[in-house]
């Protein structure tokens, strides 16, 4: 059974900022001649690794809503230079917009069952993916999306 992770995207006010950050890292790696890998480091190591790597994604909470996801490619426990155990989540750099799903603040990450995950938003569904983020947020607050 596929399992996902959900995590707050701290310091990011819109999905476009996350896209910009990924593009900047890609550009910097390209200029330095280094291979690009999208990595997120977290303190805790997920114990349900096999379920997460069976098609799971990291769903990002931006401004109180799950808004976007990235596919999980690998989960790599390691020890940092201070001897603290950490976990490297390797992610596909491609962002997939999702239907917005409200989330209260929390620390760390949480598991998200596949049946509870918001669906991807495609161009042909309700057309909301084409709306600017601020307009989508306002329409969500009014209960119109």
Image (spheres, grey):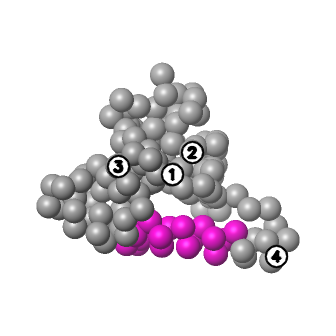
Residue nearest the observer in this picture, 3 or 44 = 3
Residue at the location (48% across, 73% down)? 17
- Mark 4 and mark 3 lie on one chain; the one further toward the N terminus is 4
Residue at x 39%, y 45% (from the top left corner): 125
Mark 1 neighbour density, 10 Å: few (under 14) some (14–19) many (20 or more): some
Disc nearer the start of the sequence (1/2): 2
**Relative to 76, residue 104 above or below:** below
* Residue 37 position within the rendered picture, expressed as x and y whole percent measured from the top left: 70, 58
Distance of label 1 from label 4 (alpha carbons): 27 Å
User: Where does label 2 land, which residue?
Assistant: 71
Q: Is residue 12 visible?
A: yes
Looking at the image, is mark 2 or mark 4 earlier in the sequence? Answer: 4
Q: Which residue is the extreme one toward the left? A: 142
Q: Give the SS element for disc 2.
A: strand
Q: CA distance from mark 1 to mark 3?
A: 16 Å
* Rendered view: 47 above or below 64: above
Report the magenta residues as a range.
6-26
Residue 25 quadrant: bottom right
What residue is pinned by disc 3?
A: 126
Residues at badges 1 and 3 in contact (C-beta under 8 Å)? no
- Rendered image: mark on residue 32: 4
Q: Nearer the viewer, residue 47 or 133?
A: 133
Q: Residue 24: where, in percent of width, then height?
A: 64, 75
Which of pointers 1 and 3 lies earlier in the amino acid sequence? 1
Residue at image point 82% right, 67% down: 34
The residue identified by callout 1 is 96
Alpha-carbon span between mark 1 and mark 2? 9 Å
């Amino acid at each position: 059974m596929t399992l996902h992770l959900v995590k707050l995207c701290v310091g990011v006010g819109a999905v476009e900022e996350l896209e910009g950050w990924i593009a900047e890292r890609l550009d910097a790696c390209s200029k330095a001649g280094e291979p690009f890998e999208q990595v997120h480091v977290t303190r805790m190591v997920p114990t349900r690794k096999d379920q997460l790597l069976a098609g799971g994604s990291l769903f990002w909470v931006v401004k109180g809503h799950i808004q976007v996801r990235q596919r999980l490619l690998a989960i790599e426990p390691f020890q940092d230079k201070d001897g603290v155990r950490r976990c490297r989540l390797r992610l596909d750099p491609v962002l997939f917009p999702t239907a917005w799903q409200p989330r209260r603040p929390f620390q760390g990450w949480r598991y998200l069952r596949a049946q509870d995950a918001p669906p991807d938003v495609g161009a042909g569904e309700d057309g909301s993916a084409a709306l600017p983020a601020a307009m989508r947020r306002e329409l969500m607050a009014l209960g119109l999306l």
